[in-house]
Image (cartoon, helix red, strand yellow):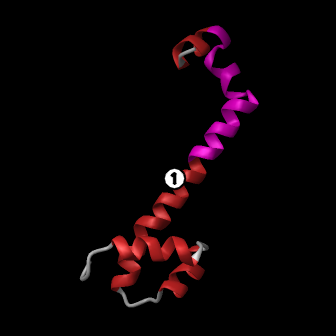
Amino acid sequence: MSREEIEAMFGLSELKQTRVYQEGEEEGKQKGRVEAKLEAIPRLLALGLTVEQIAQALDLDVAQVQQVAQQTPPNQ
């Protein structure tokens, strides 16, 4: 079913109270937080922080930071 069909069936306020909706909303927020952290990595590298320092500061795995660092062009 599409979102519109589900909203029509339940009503928007009822839909927002479902566990599925709340879990999906929280999952989306968590994904957004991780993406924001990953976008900060090139700027922190440009400031001279090490991969380990960035991982610790952003509460990420060193491997995640290394992956972004490898994809970041020099002088960015």
Residue occupying image coordinates x 45% and y 71%: 67
Where is residue 5 drawn, in percent x and y?
Answer: 56, 11
Choose between 45 and 72: the one closer to the eye.
Answer: 72
Residue 4 versus residue 53 in the image, above or below:
above
Q: Is residue 23 magenta?
A: yes
Tell me where residue 20 appears, x and y as whole percent: 71, 31
- In percent of width and height, residue 53 lies at 53, 87
Q: Is residue 72 left or right of residue 9?
A: left
Q: Which residues make up the magenta segment? A: 9-28
Q: Dot 1: what SS?
A: helix
Q: In this view, does 20 lie above or below 41?
A: above
Residue type indicated by callout 1: Gly
Q: In which quarter of the image is the C terminus?
A: bottom left
Q: Name the residue under label 1.
A: 32
Q: Could you tell me which residue is drawn at 52 percent across and 70 percent down?
A: 64
- Asked if the magenta segment contains residue 26, the reply would be yes
Q: Alpha-carbon neighbours of circle 1 within 10 Å: few (<14), some, or many (≥20)?
A: few
Chief SS of the magenta region: helix
Residue 12 located left or right of residue 19: left
Q: Please give left or right for residue 36 compared with residue 11 in the image.
A: left
Q: In which quarter of the image is residue 1?
A: top right
Q: Which residue lies furthest to the right in this view?
A: 19
Which residue is drawn at the image coordinates 54% and 19% (left, top)? 3
